[in-house]
Image (cartoon, rainbow, N blue to C red):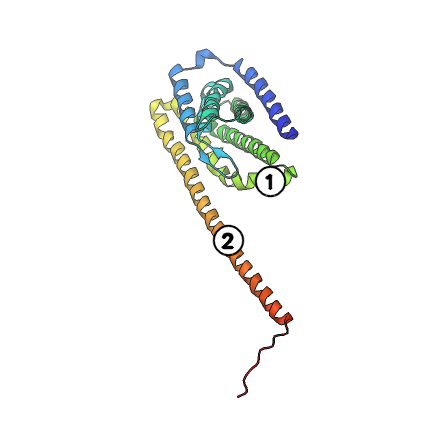
């Protein structure tokens, strides 16, 4: 309990520092209120429709709106949009405990901060920020978001389970997140491309890239449905094997008891 509490407290403190630092960089003259409102609404709606994974974990498409925001308006604005999804997550479908709210909000904030900062650094170095040529910077930043966010979530699950940390962390991360890396990065890249498309093509650019984001949500959902079906079949198979093992052990015990009693079968002579 103490390591888990300390982990959440430290992460929350880091999130507070990054949020304060990022909000100071917001340039209000760059921000279109309607666009930022649409992105915030999209983040909230996406968070309201999460895809449940294994071991008390879930993923939503809200990260696509966060990535689109830092591509358009910078990391500070992205963190504010990110807080919308954190607020929705805190109270839906049920109100969560304070410690869980603190962790979720902090993990989302820290992940968005480092992802947004990565994009700004890479796009700034290349000199093509806000251009479709900056897509590689979007891909790298999305990978940063994915690795950091999933690692933080796997860490808190492993700490809450107790025992040796590294084996549990590896098991949780492998089971919940290893399979979704390409899907996550592809969906996040579509979110960044949607933002760049908006800058370049206006509403048409958004329309072009909304499809891939929705496709990413559907593919996540379909993959989890298939995984659950496979797991249910495996559980059923394990139950059947267990029944067979019990029956076999009972038969062997009966045979041993008969042998110990000195019973010898007689065979009629031909």
User: Is 118 situated above or below 172?
Assistant: above
| SS assignment at label 1 | helix
| Residue at image point 58% right, 22% down | 12
- Disc 1, disc 2: CB below 8 Å? no
Q: Give the residue at the far front of this rendering.
A: 261
Which label number is shown at residue 120?
none
Q: Is residue 216 left or right of residue 123?
A: left
Residue in front for this viewpoint, 194 or 168:
168
Residue in front for this viewpoint, 267 or 81:
267
Q: Is residue 192 left or right of residue 149?
A: left
Image position, residue 18 (x, y; %): 57, 19
Image position, residue 149 (x, y; %): 54, 30
Which label number is shown at residue 170?
1
User: Which of disc 2 and disc 1 is earlier in sequence?
Assistant: 1
Image position, residue 190 (x, y; %): 43, 31
Q: Residues within 10 Å of mark 1 (few under 14, many from 20)?
A: some
Q: Give the residue at the far top of this rendering.
A: 29
Which label number is shown at residue 239?
2
Q: Quadrant of the N terminus?
A: top right
Image position, residue 132 (x, y; %): 43, 27
Q: Is residue 214 visible?
A: yes
User: Is 118 situated above or below 226?
Assistant: above
């Amino acid at each position: 309990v103490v390591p888990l509490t300390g982990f959440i407290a430290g992460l929350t403190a880091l999130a507070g520092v990054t949020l304060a630092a990022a909000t100071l960089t917001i340039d209000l003259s760059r921000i279109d209120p309607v666009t930022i409102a649409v992105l915030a609404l999209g983040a909230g709606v996406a968070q309201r429709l999460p895809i449940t994974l294994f071991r008390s974990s879930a993923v939503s498409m809200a990260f696509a709106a966060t990535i689109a925001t830092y591509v358009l308006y910078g990391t500070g604005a992205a963190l504010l949009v990110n807080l919308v999804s954190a607020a929705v997550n805190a109270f839906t479908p049920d109100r969560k405990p304070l410690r869980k709210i603190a962790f979720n909000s902090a993990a989302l904030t820290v992940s968005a901060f480092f992802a947004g900062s990565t994009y700004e650094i890479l796009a700034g170095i290349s000199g093509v920020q806000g251009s479709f040529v900056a897509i590689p910077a979007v891909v790298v930043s999305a990978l940063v978001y994915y690795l950091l966010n999933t690692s933080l979530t796997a860490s808190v699950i492993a700490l809450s389970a107790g025992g040796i940390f590294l084996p549990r962390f590896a098991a949780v991360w492998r089971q919940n997140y290893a399979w979704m890396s390409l899907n996550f990065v592809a969906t996040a890249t579509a979110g960044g491309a949607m933002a760049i498309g908006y800058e370049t093509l206006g509403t048409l650019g958004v329309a072009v890239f909304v499809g891939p984001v929705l496709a990413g949500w559907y593919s996540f959902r379909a993959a989890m449905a298939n995984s659950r079906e496979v797991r249910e079949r495996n559980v059923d198979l394990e139950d059947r094997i267990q029944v067979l093992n019990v029956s076999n052990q009972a038969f062997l015990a009966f045979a041993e008891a008969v042998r110990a009693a000195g019973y010898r079968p007689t065979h009629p002579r031909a």
